[in-house]
Image: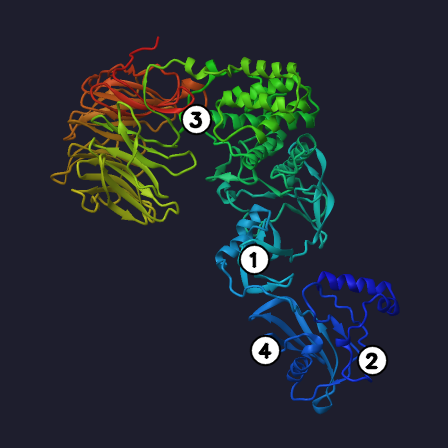
């Protein structure tokens, strides 16, 4: 029913027929009956709107309409009265819809395309020669001049139609049907394609009827085709601590309840994953899941124990803070819905985290409350969504620490406002302190914005592979300055200031000092007085955020390629040339680049395509690397000369994932993981020919491939009686034979050490060994290519043995990056550092091996080493708040 019809019928119910007629327009002569004896048409007003001369309704007729069937008689009658009713009655103009009772219904078409809502009806009585027309009318549009051919493809039209769903869960899950072209009868008409968009997500059904302009590709008209069978209601339950609380829920038509808050502009739906893996919630809510249900308004204890009650209430508190304090309507600023998921797992164990993934996902640490129990955690994760909405901050290095600092700030601001805490309370800056059943808040908290850290002395120089350059490790440097501002200004003023800076001044690659300037600019724009500006300046000064602070961090290395933004650059160096995996910008997939170790701009080796290029290797003349498409359905190993020339593929597969690519002249080797059966092996390409898998004994697999100077090595492993056995293996490429193996003394697998990191170095093979017992440390070992003369370069029981180690070597030295099992525990001290030992040094079986010397005293991360000539080492360094490829010609020795 059109809006005009509804409106007219409502008026007719309130007025008498006489009053309605007296208000009508004069009767046009064209609508008079066919003979002087016929009464005037009782409803002469043409109410269909602009652009049509056809009347909406004419009654009181008794016009003869003899003929065969009712439809033929009705069409013939309209054709004969064209001048009177202005309806073209040919089959190209009116398509028969059917006959019901004594009424024939036609659909108007325009050049064969149906006109939306344009049904014209002919009312009959009698049959055959005595048939009469008693009335005509409906909607017929005489002024149409719309095109009849679409220029927007149907696939594009469907994609546009999907955008009417505001909920991203529903948008991702939507199915779009295509009902073909229609003409929208406004003015001269508008050609559109009619779609039905239907989504079932999070237990909710969304149906939209959408009309997309078929020549402009925009939504022309849409309406909701589904009814929500629920009403706002109050429910009760217990929180994680067992306290009885009240919260907003949704009462269903059948009298049951769901944990859906319908009272705010932003709908809140809270789900219990019931132990499902967190990976299932990285996209839309899985089909079939509904918000936490209850048979009555009093929720069972399980809803509190899972964290659902706390999550539901805390998300509402964050939304209320956004609205009242920041003037923002939800995360998207438009009142968009938000979902929360509690009680998730990860790989069969607890999900010890909380996460924003277009929804808030809450895990729990073993023996502790759900992360949903902390209002500041909910505020933190939701504020990640806010940051993504208002202007993406690329989450690496200082920019990432700024984002974490901002979301910590808003999370804690919600928390202290909810609790009514004073800003001078020493616990006001704690994040996550409410997740512990026992212990003090200080012991439970994840971070403390009052920890007093400053950039110059406390910045953790993580590379981009470690916490994305220190996102969380360095966040309290920035959030501490913001929290100081909130302590010294009125909290409401500080909240508005941080929000204004975030939404209007911060840019995607902002650093600490630029963010300081953004806060000051926002303060000036707010009209804050000079004393407030001095307060802001003093807060940043107190946390060491001053111009040029990074340059005061000492370095003893030389930069080769600064400011890498790829997650896993994996450099390799030979003969004065390097290769590295690096995207052009942080949000793009990486390509392969090469350059001189003496400096200068790099040059791209890989094609500029959408693939994910990684793991490069070079022999100083050529490079080889792997590439996978973005869908994970095709993998290649490519080679190219460093000075240019064609890119050649030596391997292509849809099921084997290449890794550890190594190049030696025109030979290329790599480890390949078969994604179908889970086995891995060694593949070798000789002279640029297609790579072939090297046969291994039944049940044996391989990893850690390296190839230099005609020698191929790998770590071979297989399942023994009680566990896996790992054996460094040497293979001569020319002869195609295994020349050496280094099995452990115990080959049962139960106590055998785990060998790995196998490398070649001249006439030696290197590897690491680590025992399987808890707390074991790592030995660095070397042997001859024939499997003899194995010796420890660093013994596992030596006081300086590393917990973990990554090797590189040349003909004279071995360099390893020594790390700890948990690099998040101790700041810079826990990040990997480089050590070097002589390749032919160390003791025999009774010796503790050579004493390693430090390669560099840089305080930050020293990772992914690659050997140069002599004692020179290249590595990835994160000391100065960015990830750089750097080098030293000789080890520093000691940093004491």
Q: Please name the residue shown 58% across and 13% down the image.
A: 538
Whole-number angstrom distance, CA of label 1 to CA of label 4: 26 Å
Question: Which callout, 2 or 4, points to the residue nearer the camera?
Answer: 2
- Marks 2/4: CA–CA distance: 31 Å
Task: Assess disc 1: are there few (<14), some (14-19) or many (≥20) residues with their C-alpha within 10 Å of its C-alpha.
Answer: many
Q: Nearer the viewer, mark 2 or mark 3?
A: 2
Mark 3, residue position = 469
Task: Give the mark toward the camera: 4 or 3.
Answer: 4
Residue 265: x, y in percent? 68, 42
Q: Give the x, y percent position of residue 419.
A: 69, 26
Q: Secondary structure at mark 2?
A: loop
Circle 4: element type: loop
Left or right of 714? Residue 565 is: right
The disc, 1 or 3, on the residue closer to the chain's N-terminal end is 1
Q: Is residue 433 visible?
A: yes
Please tell me which residue lies in front, 782 or 641: 641
Say the numbered circle drawn on residue 225: none
Secondary structure at numbered mark 1: strand
Total tally of numbered discs in the picture? 4
Q: Is residue 407 left or right of residue 559?
A: right
Question: Decide: marks 2, 3 in contact (CB < 8 A)?
Answer: no
Q: Is residue 848 left or right of residue 308?
A: left
What residue sits right under mark 1 in the picture?
A: 213
Any mark on residue 39, and which? 2
Label 2 and label 3: CA atoms lie apart by 88 Å
Q: Image quadrant for the N terminus?
A: bottom right
Residue 306 against residue 441 in the figure, above or below? below
| Local crowd size for mark 3, using a 10 Å CA cut-off: few (<14), some (14–19), many (≥20) | many
**Which badge, 2 or 4, is on the more N-terminal residue?**
2
């Amino acid at each position: 029913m059109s809006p005009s019809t509804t409106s007219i019928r409502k008026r007719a119910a309130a007025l008498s027929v006489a009053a309605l007629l007296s208000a009508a327009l004069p009767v046009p002569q064209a609508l008079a009956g066919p003979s002087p004896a016929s009464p005037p048409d009782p409803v002469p007003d043409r109410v269909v709107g602009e652009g049509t001369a056809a009347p909406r309704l004419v009654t009181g007729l008794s016009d003869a309409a003899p003929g065969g069937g009712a439809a033929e008689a009705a069409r013939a009658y309209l054709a004969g009265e064209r001048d009177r009713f202005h309806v073209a009655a040919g089959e190209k103009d009116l398509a028969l819809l059917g006959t019901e009772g004594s009424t024939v219904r036609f659909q108007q078409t325009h050049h064969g395309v149906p006109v939306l809502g344009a049904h014209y009806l002919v009312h009959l009585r009698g049959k055959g020669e005595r048939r009469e027309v008693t009335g005509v009318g409906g909607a017929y549009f005489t002024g149409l001049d719309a095109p009849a051919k679409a220029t927007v493809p149907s696939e594009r039209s469907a994609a546009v139609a999907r955008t009417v769903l505001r909920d991203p869960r529903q948008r991702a899950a939507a199915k779009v049907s295509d009902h073909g072209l229609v003409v929208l009868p406004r003015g001269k008409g508008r050609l559109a394609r009619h779609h039905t968009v239907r989504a079932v997500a999070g237990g909710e059904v969304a149906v939209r009827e959408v009309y997309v302009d078929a020549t402009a590709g925009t939504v022309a008209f849409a309406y909701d085709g589904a009814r929500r069978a629920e009403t706002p209601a109050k429910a009760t339950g217990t929180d994680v601590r067992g306290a009885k609380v009240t919260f907003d829920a949704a009462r269903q038509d059948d009298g049951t309840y769901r944990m859906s808050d319908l009272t705010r502009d932003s709908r809140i739906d809270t789900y219990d994953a019931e132990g499902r893996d967190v990976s299932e919630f990285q996209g839309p809510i899985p089909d079939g899941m509904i918000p936490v249900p209850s048979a009555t308004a009093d929720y069972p204890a399980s809803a509190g124990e899972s964290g659902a009650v706390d999550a539901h209430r805390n998300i509402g508190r964050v939304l209320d803070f956004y609205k009242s304090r920041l003037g923002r309507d939800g995360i998207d600023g438009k009142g968009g819905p938000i979902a929360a998921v509690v009680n998730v797992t990860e790989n069969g164990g607890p999900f010890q985290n909380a996460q924003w993934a277009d929804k808030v996902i809450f895990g729990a640490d073993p023996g502790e409350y759900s992360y949903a129990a902390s209002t500041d955690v909910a505020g933190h994760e939701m504020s990640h969504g806010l940051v993504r909405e208002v202007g993406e901050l690329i989450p690496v290095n200082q920019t990432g620490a700024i984002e974490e600092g901002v979301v910590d700030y808003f999370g804690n601001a919600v928390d202290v406002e909810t609790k009514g805490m004073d800003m001078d309370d020493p616990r006001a800056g704690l994040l996550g302190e409410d997740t512990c059943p026992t212990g003090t808040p200080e012991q439970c908290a994840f971070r403390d914005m009052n920890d007093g850290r400053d950039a110059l002395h406390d910045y953790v120089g993580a590379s981009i592979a470690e916490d994305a350059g220190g996102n969380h490790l360095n966040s309290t440097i920035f959030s501490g300055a913001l929290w100081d501002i909130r302590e010294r200004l009125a909290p409401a003023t500080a909240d508005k200031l941080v929000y204004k800076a975030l939404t209007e001044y911060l840019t995607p690659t902002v650093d600490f000092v630029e963010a300081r300037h953004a806060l000051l600019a926002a303060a000036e724009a707010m009209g804050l007085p000079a004393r407030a500006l001095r307060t802001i300046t003093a807060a940043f000064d107190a946390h060491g955020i001053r111009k040029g602070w990074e340059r005061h961090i000492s370095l003893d290395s030389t930069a080769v390629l600064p400011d890498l933004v790829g997650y896993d650059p994996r450099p390799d160096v030979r003969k004065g040339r390097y290769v590295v995996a690096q995207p052009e910008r942080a949000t793009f997939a990486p390509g392969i680049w090469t350059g001189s170790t003496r400096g200068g701009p790099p040059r791209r080796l890989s094609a500029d395509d959408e693939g994910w290029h990684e793991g490069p290797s070079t022999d100083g003349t050529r490079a080889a690397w792997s590439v996978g498409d973005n869908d994970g359905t095709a993998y290649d190993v490519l080679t190219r000369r460093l000075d240019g020339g064609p890119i050649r593929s030596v391997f292509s597969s849809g099921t084997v994932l290449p890794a550890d690519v190594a190049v030696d002249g025109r030979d290329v080797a790599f480890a390949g993981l078969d994604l179908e059966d889970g086995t891995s092996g060694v593949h070798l390409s000789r002279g640029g020919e297609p790579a072939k898998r090297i046969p291994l004994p039944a049940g044996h697999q391989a990893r850690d491939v390296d190839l230099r100077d005609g020698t191929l090595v790998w770590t071979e492993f297989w399942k023994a009686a009680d566990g896996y056995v790992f054996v460094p293996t040497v293979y001569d490429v020319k002869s195609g034979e295994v020349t050496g193996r280094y099995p452990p003394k115990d080959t049962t697998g139960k106590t055998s050490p785990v060998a790995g990191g196998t490398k070649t170095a001249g006439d030696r093979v290197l590897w690491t060994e680590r025992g399987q017992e808890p707390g074991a440390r790592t030995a660095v070992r070397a042997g001859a290519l024939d499997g003899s003369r194995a010796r420890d370069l660093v013994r596992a029981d030596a006081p300086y043995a590393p917990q973990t180690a990554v090797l590189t070597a040349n003909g004279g030295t071995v360099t390893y990056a020594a790390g700890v099992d948990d690099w998040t525990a101790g700041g810079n001290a826990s990040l990997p550092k480089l050590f070097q030992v002589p390749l032919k040094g160390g003791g025999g079986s009774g010796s503790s091996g050579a004493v390693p010397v430090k390669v560099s005293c840089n305080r930050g991360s020293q990772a992914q080493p690659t050997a140069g000539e002599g004692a020179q080492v290249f590595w990835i360094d994160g000391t100065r708040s960015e990830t750089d490829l750097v080098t030293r010609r000789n080890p520093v020795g000691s940093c004491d």
